[in-house]
Image: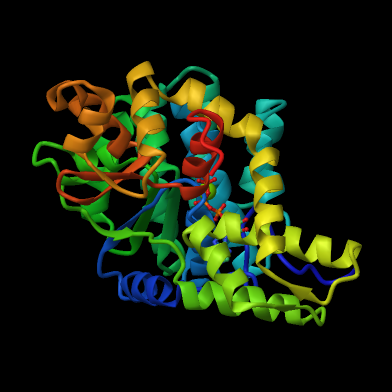
Amino acid sequence: MTEQIFIVGGEVEPPYFIGRDEEVNMIKLDLLSSAQNNVIIGPRRIGKTSLLRNLKNNVQEKVIFAYVNCRKITSLADFFRQTTGSLITAYEEKHKIKGIVKKFSDVFKGKITAATRSISEIGGSIEYIGNVYLRFRENEIDEKELISETFEFIENLSKELNEPIIIALDEFQELSKFNGNIFNMLKSHMDSQPNVRYIFSGSSVSLLHDVFLKPDSPLYLMAARIQLEPIKKKDVDDYISSRLKTQNITISEPALDLIYEYTAGYPFYFQKIGFLLYQIAVIGKKKHIGIDDVENVFSSMLDEFDSEFESRYSTKFSRQQQHILKYLSQYKTRRLTEISDDMQTPASSLTTSMRDLYNTMAVDKPKEGTYGIMDNVFRLWIKKNILGDIN
Ligand SMILES: Nc1ncnc2c1ncn2[C@@H]1O[C@H](COP(=O)(O)OP(=O)(O)OP(=O)(O)O)[C@@H](O)[C@H]1O
Ligand SMILES: [Mg+2]
């Protein structure tokens, strides 16, 4: 297989994963010293899942690291299935023992007697938790007990193996739909499990506040916050030029500046632009990339994301939020008073919408009273397609 030049979408690892040394080292230290739990917060496409994957690679010699994507969790029983499944998979991978995952998966399907036999071959706390699920299948226990048992299981497995366990809950905000059922239990177990650490990751500022920072919330101050920022310009420049160089393609400084200007260091977008540039270089047999090429591929990228942005804009935001985004799209940042002047509405009537936009990380607040659309590519798309500004 030929080497990939850029990777767009999915989790990336080195050499495609760049600019996160500080975060990796900081969280790694917390994890290995079992010092504290972490919550990683960042907007869509900033690289949260990739960061978790690289953390896993960095610490899995010393701990069992289980990754759970909370987007896949639609019921409390799902929480059980995803978490135990992922933990047992991580255990099997790390200890290089075959067949446990397969045997355990029998509890989720088929005959109870066959499942009982399969898990008895595993034994220990995995057999125990398998039997818990079988009792759930027979309606002997309810979903809430299943959740409580999940946390007990994590703790018991860690003790049994005498190894720390890390549970990474990606898209953590998805769990809020269970009305605190999971959060409350998580809290009581986090207190009592020194050998188990949690990493939460998500893109909702309000959730972070509700769950971790409000005094009456179950997880109040239980995790150290790490805000994921865009990748720094120097790292992006080095990455793009060195990736292109592997194919003997060069790129001008102004072209690199323009890429950063457009993407604002959002990894998904600079990977995409890099890939499109590589493509046109190959097709046009070009050995040098200039500013015009960046302009061209950026414009095709906007077209390519048209339907996605269109649906994001029309379904994720209220009418008033859409208006705010439209007016905001002309500027990188704008004061609230200026926005309300632009919209000819009193600033006070915008506060609720503004807060929601901020809470869902659609809008950033670089200074008190000043706002800007977080995702610069989305901003430029709104500017071009909704505002109708061709400049
Ligand atoms: N550190 C990084 N260095 C280079 N590229 C990265 C990095 N992190 C992410 N990317 C790029 O961004 C893409 C999206 O990354 P990832 O899925 O990790 O982001 P995310 O924040 O989890 O996104 P989502 O909100 O969609 O879940 C990756 O496929 C990759 O192209
Ligand atoms: Mg993700």
> Quarter of the image holding residue 229?
bottom left
Q: Which of 376 and 81 is in front in this view?
A: 376
In this view, 348 is above or below 378: above
Q: Where is residue 364 in the image (x, y as percent from the top left)?
A: 30, 46
Image position of 286 (left or right of 315): right
Q: Residue at x 66, y 58 (%)?
A: 273
Counting labels gives 0
Describe the colour scheme in one phrase: rainbow
Given residues 274 and 93, the one toward you in this image is: 274
Asked whether, in this view, residue 106 is left or right of residue 138, the answer is: right
For residue 287, which quarter of the picture? bottom right
Residue at 18% of width from left, 39% of height from top?
Answer: 218
133 on left or right of 202: right
> Is residue 267 in view from this perspective?
yes
Q: Position of residue 139 (x, y in %)?
A: 48, 17
The correct choice, above or below, for 235 with respect to 204 in the image is below
Q: Outermost residue, left direction? A: 215
Q: In this view, does 252 lie to the left or right of 174?
A: right
Check the image and report above or below for 300 versus 131: below
Depth check, front residue: 366 or 294: 294
Q: Quarter of the image holding residue 159?
A: bottom left
For image coordinates 60% across by 68% down, the residue present is: 94
Could you tell me which residue is drawn at 70 percent across and 40 percent down?
Answer: 304
Does residue 62 appear in this view? no
- Quadrant holding the N terminus: bottom right
Ligand 1 is found in the corner quadrant, namely: bottom right
Q: Where is residue 233 in the image (x, y as percent from the top left)?
A: 47, 72
Residue 242 in percent (x, y) is at 67, 81
